[in-house]
C-alpha cells in the first residue's frame, strides 16, 4: 500500500504547490469546521475533559471512531489491577534521550519532569512511563515519515522510565520541532512529545501528547482541538520551570499527569504496594 | 477491595491519538509472546482490525492484560524483557500491513469461581483520538457467559462481538471492527465516566 492509497494521514509527501495527491482542504476550511464545533460545545453548557472520538476535522478519525456509545462495564478483578514493571524492564539510563547514540544530538537540550497522579491525587508509584518524539528538525526515526528534514544520527527520540515513590518522572531530551502532515493543505503539528502511561488499574491506561507553552499552531491543529474544552486542552501544555533548568546546560519544563480515578477502594496496604 | 468508584478530586489529563509513528518506540521484542512459542498451553490469539469501510487498519497497536491459566492476577515484572518462564499477563502487538495481529498466550482462568473468563484489550491507532477498551471472552463456558453481567446487558447481536471464536487448531479468533456493521462493543468504566 502506498501513501497515495491511504488518503489523509500524518505522513508527508513533499509537494509545496497543491498537487493531485495533496489534501484539498485549506486551513481556512478546517478553521471554520473547528470553530463551529467549539461554538456548539460552548452553547451546550457541558464540561468535557477528553478528546472527542468523532472529530471530523481530524480526517483520519472519520472511519475510525465508534459510532455507538461506549458501553458501561463494572470492572472485574483483572480490570482493577495493572501490569507491574520493574528494574528488569527499564534501565535508568533510558530516561536520558541525549546519550543513546554515542554522540550529542543537535537541538535545544531540555528536561521534562513532573508527577503521575491518580484522580484522587495519589502518586502512581513504580509505574512505566514511555515517551517518543520527533527530533529538533521535526523528523521521526520511522520509515513512513518522509518529511524532508534531516535525521539526527545521534537521536532516536525514544525514552522510558519508572515513576518514583512520589509518582515523579524525569526525562532529558531535545526539544522536538513541529512537522507537516497530510490532514489538509499546509497542515503542521505543534511540537509535542508522546507519552504512554499506566496506572494501578488497567482502565487508567492512556496515551497522550505533551505540548510546549504558547505554540502558535495550537489553534490550527485538529488533534489538539479535538479536546473541545479549552481548560482541558491546557492540561496537555507543560510549563516552563526555571527551577528545573540547569546552569549552562538545559531548560526545564514541568508537566504533571492525572490519570482517571481508580475504581478500587484503597486501603493503607494498597497504597504502599 | 470493592468496586466502589472513587470520587476524583483532580480532572484527568486528556488522551490523544497514538499517531502513525509509534512503531519504532512502543513495540518491543517478544511483546506479543506472553508465553514462548511451543509452551504446552500456548494459544494463538489473533484477528484483524478494520475501519468503517471494512478496510484493514495497518497502523494500530493492541495491548492485552489477563489472568493466568488458574485465574490468578499476575504480579510479576518483566513484560518488557521477557525471561521466557515468568507469566506477566501483559502483551503488546502492532498489527501488520494487513491489519492483522497475533498474540501467543494461555487461556485465562476465571478470576472467581463461575465467572466467565476474559482477556482485557486496549486499542490504539492513528485516527483514534483516545484509546478504546474491550473484553475478549473465551467461548466455551456457556453457563458462565449466560450469567455474565456485561454480556447480559447487551442485545444478542452486539454481545457476540465480544466472544472469541475457537478455531479448529485451538486458536482464538477475535476481530475488531472500529465502526459499522458488527461494530465491536467498546467499554467505559465508572472511573472514566466522571
Image (cartoon, coloured by chain):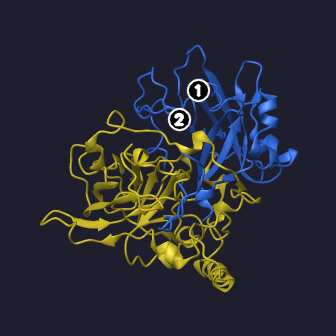
Chain colours: A yellow, B blue
Q: Residue A150's image quarter?
A: bottom left
Q: Which residue is mark 2?
A: B91
x%, y% of residue A174? 29, 59
x%, y% of residue A5? 67, 52
Please, is residue A3 above or below residue B24 in the view?
below
* Residue at x 52% of width, y 58% of height: A261
Q: Residues within 10 Å of mark 1 (few under 14, many from 20)?
A: many
Q: Quadrant of the N terminus of chain A?
A: top right
Q: Chain of mark 2?
A: B
Q: Is there any visible trace of residue A20 in the rendered image?
A: no
Q: Which residue is mark 1?
A: B105
Q: Residue A89's image quarter?
A: top left
Q: Chain of mark 1?
A: B
Q: Quadrant of the C terminus of chain A?
A: top left
Tell me the number on the disc at residue A232. none
Secondary structure under badge 2? Answer: strand
Secondary structure under badge 1? Answer: strand
x%, y% of residue A155? 31, 50
Q: How many marks?
A: 2
Please, is residue B118 above or below residue B126 in the view?
above
Q: Is there any visible trace of residue B32 in the rendered image?
A: yes
Q: Residues within 10 Å of mark 2 (few under 14, many from 20)?
A: many
Which residue is the extreme one toward the right? B156
* Residue at x 76% of width, y 40% of height: B148
Amino acid at each position: 500500500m502506498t501513501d497515495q492509497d491511504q488518503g489523509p494521514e500524518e505522513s508527508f509527501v513533499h509537494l509545496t504547490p497543491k498537487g493531485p495527491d495533496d489534501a484539498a482542504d485549506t486551513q481556512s476550511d478546517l478553521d471554520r469546521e473547528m470553530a463551529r464545533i467549539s461554538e456548539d460545545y460552548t452553547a451546550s453548557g457541558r464540561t468535557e475533559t477528553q478528546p472527542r472520538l468523532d472529530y471530523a476535522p481530524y480526517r483520519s478519525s472519520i472511519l475510525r471512531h465508534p459510532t455507538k456509545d461506549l458501553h458501561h462495564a463494572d470492572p472485574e478483578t483483572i480490570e482493577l489491577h495493572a501490569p507491574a514493571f520493574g528494574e528488569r524492564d527499564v534501565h535508568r539510563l533510558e530516561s536520558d534521550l541525549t546519550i543513546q547514540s554515542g554522540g550529542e544530538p543537535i537541538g535545544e537540550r531540555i528536561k521534562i519532569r513532573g508527577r503521575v497522579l491518580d484522580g484522587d491525587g495519589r502518586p502512581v508509584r513504580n509505574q512505566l512511563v514511555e515517551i517518543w518524539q520527533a527530533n529538533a528538525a521535526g523528523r521521526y526515526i520511522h520509515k513512513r515519515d518522509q518529511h524532508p528534514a534531516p535525521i539526527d544520527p545521534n537521536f532516536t527520540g525514544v525514552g522510558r522510565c519508572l515513576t518514583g515513590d512520589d509518582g515523579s518522572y524525569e526525562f532529558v531530551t531535545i526539544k522536538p520541532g513541529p512537522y507537516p502532515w497530510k490532514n489538509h493543505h499546509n497542515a503542521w503539528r505543534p511540537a509535542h512529545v508522546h507519552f504512554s502511561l499506566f496506572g494501578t488499574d488497567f482502565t487508567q491506561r492512556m496515551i497522550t501528547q505533551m505540548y510546549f507553552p504558547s505554540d502558535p499552531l495550537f489553534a490550527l491543529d485538529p488533534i489538539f482541538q479535538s479536546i473541545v474544552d479549552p481548560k482541558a486542552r491546557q492540561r496537555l501544555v507543560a510549563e516552563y520551570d526555571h527551577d528545573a533548568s540547569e546552569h549552562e546546560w538545559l531548560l526545564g519544563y514541568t508537566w504533571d499527569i492525572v490519570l482517571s480515578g481508580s475504581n478500587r477502594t484503597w486501603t493503607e496496604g494498597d497504597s504502599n504496594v | 477491595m470493592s468496586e466502589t468508584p472513587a470520587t476524583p478530586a483532580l480532572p484527568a489529563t486528556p488522551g490523544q491519538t497514538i499517531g502513525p509513528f509509534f512503531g519504532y518506540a512502543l513495540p518491543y521484542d517478544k511483546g506479543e509472546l506472553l508465553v514462548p512459542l511451543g509452551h504446552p498451553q500456548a494459544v494463538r490469539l489473533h484477528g484483524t482490525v478494520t475501519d468503517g469501510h471494512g478496510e484493514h487498519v495497518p497502523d494500530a497497536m493492541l495491548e492485552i492484560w489477563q489472568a493466568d491459566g488458574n485465574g490468578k492476577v499476575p504480579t510479576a515484572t518483566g513484560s518488557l524483557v521477557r525471561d521466557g518462564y515468568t507469566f506477566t499477563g501483559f502483551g503488546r502487538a502492532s498489527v501488520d500491513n494487513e491489519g492483522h495481529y497475533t498474540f501467543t498466550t494461555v487461556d485465562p482462568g476465571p478470576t472467581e469461581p463461575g465467572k466467565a473468563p476474559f482477556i482485557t484489550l486496549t486499542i490504539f491507532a492513528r485516527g483514534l483520538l483516545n484509546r478504546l477498551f474491550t473484553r475478549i471472552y473465551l467461548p466455551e463456558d456457556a453457563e458462565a457467559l449466560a450469567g455474565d453481567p456485561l454480556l447480559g446487558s447487551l442485545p444478542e447481536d452486539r454481545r457476540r462481538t465480544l466472544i472469541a471464536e475457537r478455531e479448529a487448531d485451538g486458536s482464538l479468533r477475535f476481530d475488531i471492527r472500529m465502526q459499522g456493521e458488527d461494530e465491536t462493543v467498546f467499554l467505559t468504566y465508572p472511573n472514566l465516566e466522571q
